[in-house]
Amino acid sequence: MLNIALFGPPGAGKGTQSEKLIQKYNLLYISTGDILRKEIASGSELGKKINEITSQGHLVSDELIMQIIHKTIAESPHVNGILFDGFPRNLSQAKLLEELMEELQMPFTGVLSLEVPREELIARLINRGKVSGRSDDKEDVIIERLKEYESKTLPVAEYFTKKGNFHPVKGVGSLDEIFDRLVAEIEKHRK
Ligand code: ADP
């Protein structure tokens, strides 16, 4: 069983690499960002509230995130493992992830972190904004998302590093090169 959190700043390539990883290892994919965007697209009241927060580059509440994660897992009871993308994003979510794994009696394999320099991230996100239509892929919001990442999300890296299950991977190069690095890291740490 393989339960991984793919970690890294906005624009690190988590979504792209996730697609390849879930295929290779047949994992349940939980992208909190994708699920939130679907809720926004549905036009629901909840979606409107989420949009107000995400379009400013801020994080939505831990309660909402845990609700959508529990719901996604309940809908797919028999899985080989889970790939989390975009979660955990702050220290309290890191602890909630560990509790969730215990509750489900699933072993947590660890955090794989895609490491990409800041200038490259900004360039990638501005480019993506031209085609994605995402309301948060605009320069001022990108800067805000990176700030949120540095203040709230980076402590998660430190938390798992202390526990010995944080594994950095170079996130620059061709898609296949980066994928091969991720797979090599997974093979080293899977239980
Ligand atoms: P990116 O990593 O490119 O910023 P995501 O698609 O992972 O994008 O997330 C988009 C937005 O959704 C975030 O900026 C944040 O507002 C919200 N979000 C996603 N995941 C979480 C989470 N685990 N906790 C709080 N907010 C989240």
Image (tube, rainbow, N blue to C red):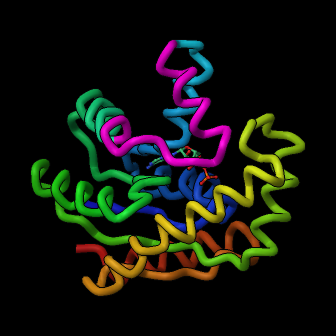
| Quadrant housing residue 70 | top left
| Residue lying at 52% horizontally and 69% vertically, measured from the top left | 151
Residue 187 place in picture, x, y as percent:
38, 77
Along the line of sight, the residue nearer the viewer: 100 or 179: 100
Q: Quadrant of the C terminus?
A: bottom left
| Residue lying at 27% horizontally and 43% vertically, measured from the top left | 79
Q: Quadrant of the N terminus?
A: bottom left
| Residue lying at 81% horizontally and 74% vertically, measured from the top left | 119
Residue 52 in magenta stretch: yes
Residue 125 place in picture, x, y as percent:
78, 56
**Image: 11 above or below 182:** above
Along the line of sight, the residue nearer the viewer: 105 or 54: 54
Magenta: main secondary structure? helix
**Image: 133 above or below 15:** above
| Quadrant housing residue 97 | bottom left
**Image: 95 above or below 100:** below
Q: How many marks?
A: 0
Residue 69 in magenta stretch: no
Along the line of sight, the residue nearer the viewer: 49 or 10: 49
| Residue lying at 38% horizontally and 79% vertically, measured from the top left | 166
Residue 143 place in picture, x, y as percent:
73, 60
Q: Is 170 left, or right, of 119 in this rendering?
A: left
Q: Is 131 left, or right, of 69 in this rendering?
A: right
Residue 23 place in picture, x, y as percent:
49, 50
Q: Which residues are magenta?
A: 45-65
